[in-house]
Image (tube, grey):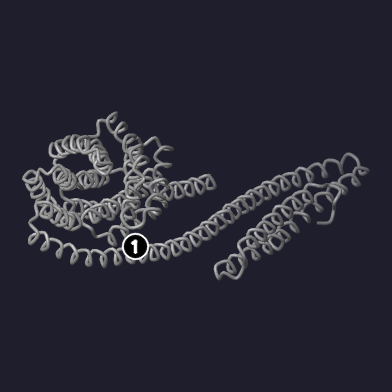
Amino acid sequence: MREYRLFAVIYFLLTQVCYSQQPSNTADSLQVNTLNRLGYETRLTDPEMTIGYGKRALKLASKINFKNGIAESFRVIGIGNYYVGRNDTAIAKYLASLALFKETKNLNGQAKLYNNIGNLYREVDYDKGLFFFKQSLALAKKLNMQDLIAGCHLNIGIIYYRKKQYNTALINFEKSYNLFTSLNNAIGITQSLQNRGVIYFKLKQISKAESLLIEANKKAKENELNNTIASINLTLTSVYIEQKKFKKAEETGNEGLAYAQLVKDKKLEQDYIYTSYELESKRKNYEQALYYLREVYRLDSIAYNNDLSGKIGLIQEQYKFRERERENQLIIERQKASRILYIATFVVLILSIVVIILLVMNVRKKNKTNKQLQGLNDEISLQKENLDRINHNLEEIIAERTKDLQIKNKKLSAYSSHLSHQIRSPIATMKGLMLLEQEDLIEKDEFVKEVGKCVNEIDDKILNINKTLHDPKDQDF
């Protein structure tokens, strides 16, 4: 009964350890997901609010150790920083998020992050941006993430537009438009319309460009996409300048600039200054045009330095991320070694328990045998007295039986002594091996091999002892 109780205690402890490592699904984790979703949804209307939601989600997720929630919080904070132009902060948050999503093997999160990282490189390194978008697209197709597939085609189209491969860009924009339409994704539809309008403007198909951009502008205002409105108005202003609708160009440009200032997009503000230069130049208002041109050159110089700083920042953050990944890999390797040691220790513990149980059972069996022998001795004595009176010739038979019992007693006595010495040796060896393992003085494979030898040696000795004990032909132990 005691042995069963011991096994029950061990099973309970192991069960508790296993369950304690399972992630909890609490109201807090649902709140983390809600905050992250709200942060993502406000990215085009108020990026600073996006960052605020992300930070609140991160604080709560860290408190409950919700790793996927922490990873998504980092991603949302990175998106907010991207939309306000802090690319070095954005890449740092993205890489921290990517490391956690890889740790939890969350392919869904990884697919989204590759798309986000591609957006960072979209303006500074077309090839690298395209590389990340294609990685995201491959994962999105594997996971059947239709929204992300559409988004990847949209971003890939933007890269090809930047490379002036307009036909390839249009193909991707049309794919994204069709997918977003089937999903009834208003934001995606708006951005696809906008980008197609930009392409047709570059191809000098002005009327088609104007139609697409006006439709995109209407949808953007319906959904309060402030950043998108600012971007659409910029191209619409250029369209009106091309059509010599200068008054309309001025009104559209002023409205777009107000939206750009609202979302604090410095890049768009600079683009509006250049568009203002183009407008005043077409109006032949050269004094005002010269003022805007000077401002453009000044801002171009600042933008160049910022872009250079941004690239350096991205490179530095990637280097830091690789260093952290190497450190994490070392930690993982140490954890693996610790788990192996734990398993080996647990195996030794179980084997020790088994040995103890066998010893207890043998002791009990020995006591039972001794009682039986004592009873036999009493019976033999009684029979001997009776037989002495009946037939003196039976003395030899009684003597022979007595001798047999003496041999058994001798074996049992020798067995008890022999058992303690034979079993002690391999157990002592295993203790020594464990000490070596704790001090990192023995290789893992050698440790497992030597422990196996000791276990086999214990098993062989027990089998040999039992065989000898129960062999009537063997009189010497």
- The residue singled out by tag 1 in the image is 314
Spot occupied by residue 8 in the image (x, y as percentages of width and height): 48, 45
Please give the count of numbered marks on the rendered protein.
1
- Between 366 and 254, the residue placed more toward the observer is 254
Spot occupied by residue 79 in the image (x, y as percentages of width and height): 26, 52
Quarter placement of the C terminus: bottom right
Spot occupied by residue 54 in the image (x, y as percentages of width and height): 23, 52
Q: Is residue 428 visible?
A: yes
Asked whether, in this view, residue 453 is left or right of residue 299, the answer is right
Spot occupied by residue 437 in the image (x, y as percentages of width and height): 58, 66
Identity of the amino acid at label 1? Answer: Leu
Q: Is residue 170 above or below residue 118?
A: above
- Between 9 and 128, the residue placed more toward the observer is 128
Asked whether, in this view, residue 53 is left or right of residue 258, the answer is right
- Between 371 and 200, the residue placed more toward the observer is 200
Q: Is residue 229 visible?
A: no
Residue at x-position 7% and y-position 56% = 285
Residue at x-position 59% and y-position 65% = 434
Query: Element at badge 1?
Result: helix
Report the residue that reaches farthest toward the right: 393
Q: Please tell me in which quadrant of the rendered image residue 156 appears.
A: top left
